[in-house]
Image (cartoon, helix red, strand yellow):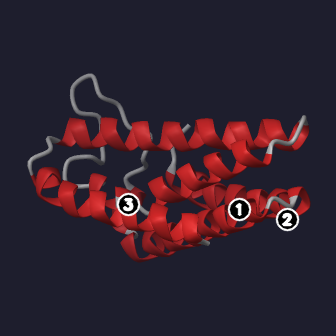
Amino acid sequence: MKRILTSTAVGVFALGLASTALADLKPEDQILYRQAGYSFMSWNMGKIKANLEGDYNEAQVAAAANTIAAIANSGMGALFGPGTDKAVGDVKTRVKPEFFQNMDEVGKLARDFIAASDQLAAVAAEGDQVEVSSAFGELGEACKACHDKYRAD
């Protein structure tokens, strides 16, 4: 639990520092930064999956889960600003335009994702592989809920 609070505090602090910088970000930079965040979360989810399917290392799983939770809590929603709904020059995005037209639903999906990432981090801190597997599945479902509706192929 202490790790979750620490990672959340770091995320909130980073968001506070970044919020003024976000106002100056060009749309293409916002797209690149959010893609980097999602890629890093995906890489960490891959590490958890590999541990669940192979030799389970509690420390690796906890570190990956904490990383996912920290990124999820970092305020990445601010990177979906005006002009980021379509490609900008050579910078492409797979976000469907409907994403920007349904912000109430997107907000709910984001809150569900954050809750699932926090739950995974809490369970991973305890080290029970069965519980981690269940929480990991719930996080995957939270990801899928948004991808299915708002991510272009």
Q: Amino acid at mark 2?
A: Glu
Question: Mark 3 touching mark 2, by CB under 8 A?
Answer: no
Image position of 39 (left or right of 1): left
Q: Is residue 45 above or below residue 68?
A: above
Chain-order first, disc 3 or disc 2:
3
Residue 95: % across, % down: 42, 47
Residue 92: % across, % down: 35, 31
Chain-order first, disc 2 or disc 1:
1
Residue 85: % across, % down: 30, 48
The residue carrying mark 2 is: 131
- Total labels: the figure holds 3
Instruction: Write the residue at 56% across / 70% down.
Output: 2
Instruction: Write the residue at 76% across / 64% down.
Output: 135
Q: Which mark is residue 125?
A: 1
Q: Which mark is residue 10?
A: 3
Quarter of the image that includes the N terminus: bottom right
Quarter of the image that includes the C terminus: top right
